Image (cartoon, rainbow, N blue to C red):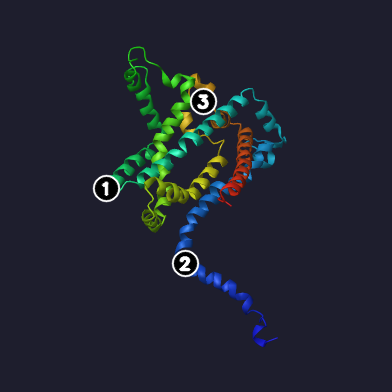
Amino acid sequence: MSISTVAKPGGQADVPKRGIWRYVKRHRAFYLMLIPGILYFLVFKYLPLAGSFIAFQDFNIFKGFSGSEWVGFKWFQQLFEYPNFGRLMKNTLIISLYQVVFAFPLPILLALMLNEVRKMAYKRIVQTVLYLPHFLSWTIVFGLSYMLLSPTNGFVNQLIGRAEDGIAFLQVPDYFRTIIITSGIWKEMGWNAIIFIAALAGISPSLYEAAKIDGANRFKQFLHISLPGLLPAIMILLLLKIGHILDSGFEQIYQFLNPAVFETGDVLDTYTYRVGILQGQYSITTAIGLFKSLIGFVLLVVANRISKWTTGEGIY
């Protein structure tokens, strides 16, 4: 054996470690930029996991974690035996399904349409106008919706000729889900299209030039270049959406919810607010959160495997 191939103690074994620290030192500015994001996830995502065990306690805020009685799966049983649990699950799943079916594809279509615009000034103006609703709070969006759908002098009632005996759209259970999905699309469609516009911008222009030389028209370029280029982003965001299938959007629904539409609008998030915040039952609300997380995790794993099997794309 050659002498040069023998590993020296404290020599070659330390090279990878030195190389890592040298790399970190060279790119220290980027690692410093990571610190706020890491702290955010540690403080608001990982540390709160330590409190999840109060779902198995009869938690008393004055007795604390150590002084509260352990009750096992009592709160999960109480949740499943709640008379309106079926209604809560049904409403949550239907609204989330509508968001996936109707709200999810529209930002993709918007990004594809904006990608076909050749006049940059017009494209930027349209993008800015479509982004603006995202920065409005749901309180303002509800106020605008109330003015549009008001039974007295509402724009929609005037439009359909019901100015005198207007329909109270916000108090009709059959219209609630439509209003939620429509207002969500209006507010977030432009903002959600940003990531798809960025994905389209990352497609090499040479692919389009080669397609033109081969005689491909705009539709064929979209079908064979733009859409495949968007597929990774589409699949990742769809998988993340499936993982949050039981998170139907508390802030939006709570603004529009009223006793007249509980039948179709009351979801797990609004029930959690009423029981946990207003009544102070922290254990059952933690149990609801664990239940939602477990369902989301299982669906995410299953959907990711199906995606890897069918398209080759996944989040891990």
Where is mark 3, residue-wise?
265
* Element on which disc 1 rests: helix
Q: In front of the other: label 2 or label 3? A: 3
* Element on which disc 2 rests: loop
Q: In front of the other: label 1 or label 2? A: 1
Residue 6 in the image, given as x and y percentages of width and height: 67, 83
Q: Residues within 10 Å of mark 3 (few under 14, many from 20)?
A: many
Q: What residue is shown at x 60% (from left), y 43% (from top)? A: 303
- Relative to the observer, which residue lies in front, 241 or 7? 241
Q: Which mark is residue 247?
A: none
**93 w.r.t. 24: above or below:** above
- Which corner quadrant of the image does residue 293 belong to? top right
**Considering only order in the chain, which callout, 3 or 2, is on the residue closer to the N terminus?**
2
Q: CA distance from mark 2 to mark 3?
A: 50 Å
Residue 302 in sight: yes
Q: Is residue 263 left or right of residue 70?
A: left
Residue 152 in the image, given as x and y percentages of width and height: 34, 17
**Considering only order in the chain, which callout, 2 or 1, is on the residue closer to the N terminus?**
2
Residue 199 in the image, given as x and y percentages of width and height: 43, 51
Residue 137 in sight: no
Where is mark 2, residue-wise?
27
Q: What residue is shown at x 37% (from left), y 43% (from top)? A: 113
Q: Give the amino acid at mark 2.
A: His
Q: Residues within 10 Å of mark 2 (few under 14, many from 20)?
A: few
Where is mark 1, residue-wise?
121
Q: Is residue 232 left or right of residue 128?
A: right
Q: What residue is shown at x 32% (from left), y 46% (from top)? A: 117
> Residue lying furthest bottom in this view?
3
